Amino acid sequence: MLGHTIGEAYDQLAELAPGAPLGAGSRRPVVRTCHGTQPATGVVEAFASIATGEQVRAMAFRLEQGPDLRWRCAAVDLGGERLSAVG
């Protein structure tokens, strides 16, 4: 993941992962809807609703394209909980 994140996003996503916030026991999360916008050249902001059984969570993230033309995650929000700051 290190090459796919910028700023503090890697550390914050690593802290989040063990808690499996989108998982509910043995149920697999399913993306219900996903939409995105391009507010500027080289920037994509996307959001999705993710269902795990009866639970539905919202997830939003920002991708930024670097000078090497690779896309990296710059920010993530999960159900209103900010997980990383824009780098």
Image (cartoon, rainbow, N blue to C red):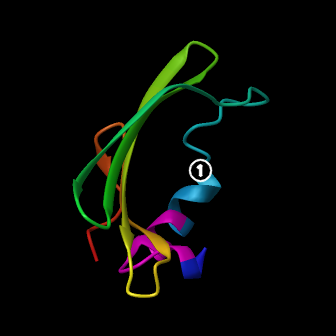
Q: In this view, does 7 lie above or below 50?
A: below
Q: Which residue lies furthest to the right in this view?
A: 26
Task: Give the image quarter of residue 67.
Answer: bottom left
In the displayed structure image, the side of residue 40 where residue 82 appears, left or right: right
Secondary structure at badge 1 equals helix
Residue assigned mark 1:
19
- Secondary structure character of the magenta stretch overall: helix
Residue 17 x %, y %: 60, 57
Mark 1 is surrounded, within 10 Å at the Cα level, by few (under 14), some (14 to 19) or many (20 or more) other residues, namely few
Q: Residue furthest left?
A: 39
Q: Which amino acid does label 1 sit on?
A: Gly
In the displayed structure image, the side of residue 76 where residue 17 appears, left or right: right
Q: Which of 23 and 75 is in front in this view?
A: 75
Q: Which residue is drawn at 36% across and 36% down?
A: 79
Q: Is residue 11 magenta?
A: yes
Q: Is residue 79 above or below residue 44?
A: above
Q: Nearer the viewer, residue 6 or 18?
A: 6
Q: In which quarter of the image is the C terminus?
A: bottom left
Task: Give the image quarter of residue 42.
Answer: bottom left
Please give the range of residues in magenta: 4-13
Residue 33 x %, y %: 48, 24
Q: Which residue is drawn at 53% across and 19% down?
A: 55
Q: How many labels does the image show?
A: 1
